Amino acid sequence: MENTYPDGDTYVCPDCSHEWPQRSTKSEDGDVVVRDVNGNVLVSGDSVVVIKDLKVKGSSIPLKQGSMIRNIRLVEGDAEHIEGNSDKIKGLVLKTCFLKKA
């Protein structure tokens, strides 16, 4: 719409009340940019911390808040998921909205 305006770090449409973030998930050269819950850019090899207890499908062991995931790998073409291993659970695929950079 032509009536949209920036408000902080989001755009707002007064006609339909829709809001969306100004920053894109793609960089200028077209690569996908992966960000944690605080907006920090994640790259392969980083360490992240889980911000809330998570149930793990296929395991009876939950992933506790504060668990460290070291040496993450980015999922190609997906800005919302990373791969990694915790101390007790191997082969995790986690959503970035539950992670913060360590």
Image (cartoon, rainbow, N blue to C red):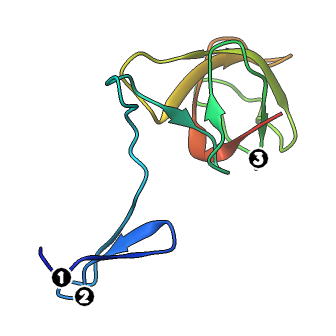
Pair 3/2: label in front: 2
Which label was assigned to residue 53? 3
To which residue does mark 1 refer? 3
**Left or right of residue 67: residue 79:** left
- Residue type for callout 2: Pro
Q: Which residue is mark 2?
A: 14
Q: At label 1, which amino acid type do we have?
A: Asn
Residue 9 screen position, x and y as percent: 50, 66
Coordinates of residue 4 in the picture (x, y in percent): 24, 77
Q: Quadrant of the C terminus?
A: top right
Marks 2 & 1, CB-CB < 8 Å contact: yes
Amino acid, disc 3: Asp
Between discs 1 and 3, the one toward the N terminus = 1
**Structural crowding at the residue carrying mark 1, measured as other residues with C-alpha within 10 Å and reported as few (<14), some (14–19) or many (≥20):** few
Q: Is residue 76 above or below residue 54?
A: above
Which residue is pictured at 47% across the width and 36% down the height? 80
71 w.r.t. 4: above or below? above
Q: Earlier in the sequence, mark 2 or mark 1?
A: 1
Marks 3 and 2 close (CB-CB < 8 Å):
no
Q: Disc 2 or disc 1, which is closer to the eye?
A: 1
Q: Is residue 77 left or right of residue 68?
A: left
The residue mark sitting in front, 1 or 3, is 1
Q: Secondary structure at mark 1?
A: loop
Q: Nearer the viewer, residue 2 or 54?
A: 2
The alpha-carbon separation of the residues under discs 2 and 1 comes to 7 Å
Which residue ends up furthest to the bottom in the rendered image?
14
- Helix, strand or loop at mark 2: loop
Horizontal side of residue 27 vs 43, given as left or right: left
**Count of numbered tags:** 3
